[in-house]
Image (tube, rainbow, N blue to C red):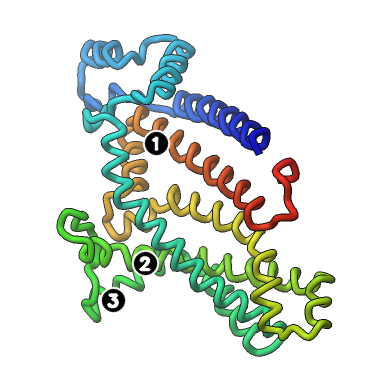
């Protein structure tokens, strides 16, 4: 297991290093000058040059890249051009919204997908299966921002059960904050749940065709008992991979839904930083998200060995 963890750690570091190079170069080739954006188009060139010197934008690209790597290793990161606030403080405040939103969306997605996927697989090619697959196809086809608008019109405007947007903050109580996350979480979970339901159905059907499942049925084990004791545990191995990727996608891909619900989350921070040409915020947050995605993949690899005892660490 130690060799397995060491290999995964080396992969983790190599991937992050590649992410730093790609992120830094991508932001360098983008048009626009952060100093000009901060001071405005009417600022005199002398003021722009002075600000570029203060921000270190006039230094060689390699020097700035290695200085950024040093800041990452020492966990200092940088200070936002726009907000004049350390990036870690900005991210910490926004993650208090985006992270619970992603968790709630993932829980809703998994709860619905597992139930519908197993239900459809157990009724393969029967009306229940066809109905579930039709519903899941509809869920995949609906854009989450359009669904978010429909949810606002129905539950906020018509029924007045929820607010149409904004976030009251956790300091105003757990329930008001949690209630503000429900509609955005449903909008995010619909597409992910539909995809996961179809994948769960396929994984369960494939596992049900294995020889050990037929052996269990031949020994007199009921269909329900075979499904829950033998099929689901093995079928969950590929499903967990999809869940890990989906959770990372939810954390990094909430920009549109957060904009619809006017929620000051991490996605909105990235969008504002890009429009303000706040390079420090963009590159630090992108790297954090890349690290989180790689970490999730690492956790999924470890869960492989835990869920399926047939898999050894060197096989994963």
In the depicted structure, whether residue 146 falls above or below residue 279? below
How many residues crowd around disc 2 within 10 Å: few (fewer than 14), some, or many (20 or more)? Answer: many
Q: CA distance from mark 2 to mark 3?
A: 10 Å
Give the camera-side residue of 66 and 140.
66
| Identity of the residue drawn at 27% across and 56% down | 262
Dots 1, 2 in contact, CB < 8 A: no
- Say which residue appears at 75% left-offset and 69% top-offset: 206
Q: Are marks 2 and 3 in contact (CB under 8 Å)?
A: no
Q: Earlier in the sequence, mark 1 or mark 2?
A: 2
Q: Which residue is mark 3?
A: 155
| Disc 2 element | helix
Quarter occupied by the N terminus? top right
| Residue 121 quadrant | bottom right
Which of labels 3 and 1 is toward the front?
Answer: 1
* In-image side of 48 versus 255 (left or right): left
- Tell me the CA gap for discs 1 and 2: 25 Å
Q: Residue at x 55, y 40 (%)?
A: 294
Which residue, as the protein is rendered here, is positioned at the far left? Answer: 172
- Identify the residue position indicated by label 1 in the image: 285
Kindly report the distance in space between the C-alpha atoms of the residues bearing marks 3 and 1. Answer: 33 Å
Residue 175 place in picture, x, y as percent: 22, 66
Q: Is residue 129 above or below residue 36?
A: below
Circle 1 or circle 2, nearest the eye: 1
């Amino acid at each position: 297991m130690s060799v397995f963890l060491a290999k995964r750690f080396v992969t983790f570091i190599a991937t992050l290093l590649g992410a730093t190079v790609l992120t830094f170069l991508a932001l360098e080739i983008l048009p626009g000058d952060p100093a000009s954006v901060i001071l405005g188009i009417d600022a005199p060139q002398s003021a722009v040059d002075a600000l570029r010197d203060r921000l270190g934008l006039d230094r060689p690209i390699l020097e700035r890249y290695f200085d950024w790597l040093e800041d990452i290793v020492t966990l200092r990161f940088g200070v936002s051009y726009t907000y004049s606030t350390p990036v870690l403080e900005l991210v910490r405040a926004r993650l208090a919204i985006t992270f619970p939103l992603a968790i709630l969306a993932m829980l809703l997605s998994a709860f619905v997908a597992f139930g519908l996927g197993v239900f459809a697989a157990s009724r393969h090619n029967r009306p229940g299966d066809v109905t579930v697959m039709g519903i899941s196809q509809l869920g995949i086809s609906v854009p989450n921002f359009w669904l978010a608008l429909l949810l606002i019109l129905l539950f906020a405007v018509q029924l007045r059960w929820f607010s149409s947007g904004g976030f009251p903050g956790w300091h105003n109580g757990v329930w008001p904050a949690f209630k503000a996350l429900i509609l955005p979480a449903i909008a995010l979970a619909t597409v992910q749940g539909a995809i996961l339901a179809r994948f769960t159905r396929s994984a369960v059907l494939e596992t049900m065709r294995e020889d050990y499942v037929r052996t269990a049925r031949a020994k007199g084990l009921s269909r329900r008992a075979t499904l829950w004791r033998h099929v689901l545990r093995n079928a969950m191995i590929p499903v967990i991979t999809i869940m890990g990727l989906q959770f990372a996608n939810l954390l990094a891909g909430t920009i549109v839904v957060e904009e619809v619900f006017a929620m000051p989350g991490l996605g909105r921070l990235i969008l504002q930083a890009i429009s303000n040409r706040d390079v420090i915020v963009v590159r630090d947050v992108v790297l954090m998200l890349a690290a989180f995605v790689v970490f999730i993949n690492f956790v999924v690899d470890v869960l492989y060995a835990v869920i399926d005892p047939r898999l050894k660490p060197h096989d994963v």
